[in-house]
Amino acid sequence: FYPEKREFFLENAQLFRFRGAGGEMPFFSRRIGMSDGEAVPIDVGARLSGKVGDNDVGFLSVKTAGVEAKNIDEGRHTVLRLKHKLRGRSYVGGIFTDTHQGELDSRTYGLDGQWFFNNYLSFSGNVISVDEENIGDENMAVTGNLDYTSDPFGFGIVYNKIGKNFDPEMGYVRRKGFEKNRLQLRRSVRTVGYPIRRFS
């Protein structure tokens, strides 16, 4: 899990960002042009990204060459990312990836969003699903996060579930087959005249 350094993938890379609470990502650019740690030649690629009104649009399509000596087939990798800005910092978005390589035909669909009810209370969440032949059930990842953050008080409720067959071909997942629930409560007190200015 090394950061991307190829210039073609770095420009407007934040537009393609889509991540769940467990670190799962439907798109991770280093999965393109790499196979088991080995570099795979990229024949041609196209990228379109920018703003259209209140919408962020990102499109990326790359064709990778086959490597006969390593038994790697040529592949076509496509990702489409859309984000629609709502009131304030809120947004709703989606992502679609498509991979064709040899007999592999894999697609990933994702919806995400973040809603700020006021300056302190927000909700964020996403749903990601992998569509692939013979993948079976439990092929989804779901995240929900309700957060309240003010100076004296705070709480957070996080739900994260990743199916045991969730494996996005163009993405990254640290751990599969688990469900996590977390509740966090905070009370903070500021002090005057002490070296430590805040206790939580």
Image: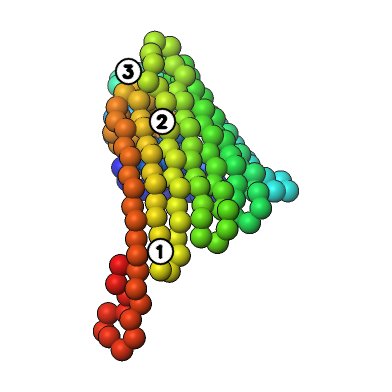
Which residue in the structure is indicated by mark 2? 141
- Asked if residue 86 is positioned above or below residue 30 in the image, the reply reads below
Which residue in the structure is indicated by mark 3? 71
Position of 66 compared to 79: left or right? left
Of residues 166 and 43, the one drawn nearer to the viewer in this rendering: 166
Q: Quadrant of the C terminus?
A: bottom left
Residue pictured at 45% horizontal, 48% vertical: 146
Residue pictured at 34% horizontal, 56% vertical: 185
Q: Earlier in the sequence, mark 2 or mark 1?
A: 2
- Asked if residue 129 is positioned above or below residue 146 in the image, the reply reads above
Q: Amino acid at mark 1?
A: Phe
Residue pictured at 37% horizontal, 37% vertical: 160
Question: Exactly how many numbered labels are in the figure?
Answer: 3
Q: Quadrant of the N terminus?
A: top left
Badge 1 local density, few (<14 within 10 Å), some, or many (20+)?
some
Of residues 119 and 143, the one drawn nearer to the viewer in this rendering: 119
Q: Please say whether residue 87 is visible from this viewpoint.
A: yes
Q: Earlier in the sequence, mark 3 or mark 1?
A: 3
